[in-house]
Image (cartoon, helix red, strand yellow):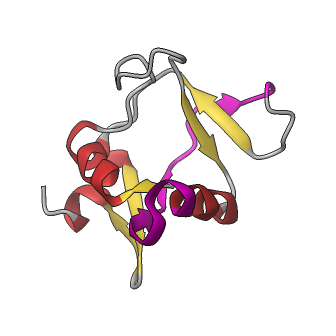
């Protein structure tokens, strides 16, 4: 989950590992396999404008053993916009099609 503004940026650039995205604390992208957790994160970050994104699992996406929680994943590889979907009231849509980029 993320904010709507960040989702628009992701639609243009894709999901970038931390340092490429300006995060100096980590060089990873963190993911969850539960929609409920993604929604709670989106709500915390975006409030009424929080959105849920999903990606297909690839070999580069591995379990995040540092959290100790089942369903937490991470990757150090970027994820292209064409491989990301957004949850809408009508179901899942390609992120780039939803924002018409």
Q: Is residue 26 left or right of residue 82?
A: right
Queried whether the magenta region covers residue 52, the answer comes back as yes
Give the position of the C terminus as an image quadrant. bottom left
The percent coordinates of residue 30 (x first, y second) are 58, 35
> Which picture quadrant has residue 58?
top right
Q: Is residue 8 visible?
A: yes
Q: Residue at left 13%, top 63%?
A: 100
Q: Residue at left 63%, top 62%?
A: 40
The percent coordinates of residue 15 (x first, y second) are 38, 36
Relative height, residue 37 to residue 57 (above, below): below
The percent coordinates of residue 19 (x first, y second) are 41, 16
> Which picture quadrant has residue 72?
top right
Question: Which residue, as the protein is rendered here, is positioned at the far bottom?
Answer: 90
> Which picture quadrant has residue 80?
top left
Q: Residue at left 68%, top 58%?
A: 37
Q: Is residue 61 visible?
A: no
Q: Is residue 84 left or right of residue 44?
A: left
Closer-to-camera residue (58/8): 8
Q: Residue at left 30%, top 44%?
A: 10
Relative height, residue 12 to residue 8 (above, below): above
Queried whether the magenta region covers residue 57, the answer comes back as yes
User: What is the count of numbered marks?
Assistant: 0
Residue range highlighted in magenta: 43-66
Question: Which residue, as the protein is rendered here, is positioned at the far right?
Answer: 68
The percent coordinates of residue 46 (x first, y second) are 44, 59
Q: Is residue 86 left or right of residue 30?
A: left
Closer-to-camera residue (59/96): 96
């Amino acid at each position: 989950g993320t904010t709507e503004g960040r989702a628009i940026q992701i639609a243009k650039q894709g999901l970038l590992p931390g340092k490429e995205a300006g995060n100096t604390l980590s060089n990873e992208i963190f993911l969850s396999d539960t929609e409920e957790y993604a929604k709670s994160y989106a709500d915390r970050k975006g409030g009424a404008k929080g959105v849920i994104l999903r990606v297909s699992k690839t070999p580069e996406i591995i379990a995040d053993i540092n959290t100790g929680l089942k369903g937490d994943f991470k990757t150090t590889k970027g994820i292209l916009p064409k491989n990301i979907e957004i949850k809408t009231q009508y179901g899942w849509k390609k992120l780039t099609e939803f924002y018409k980029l």
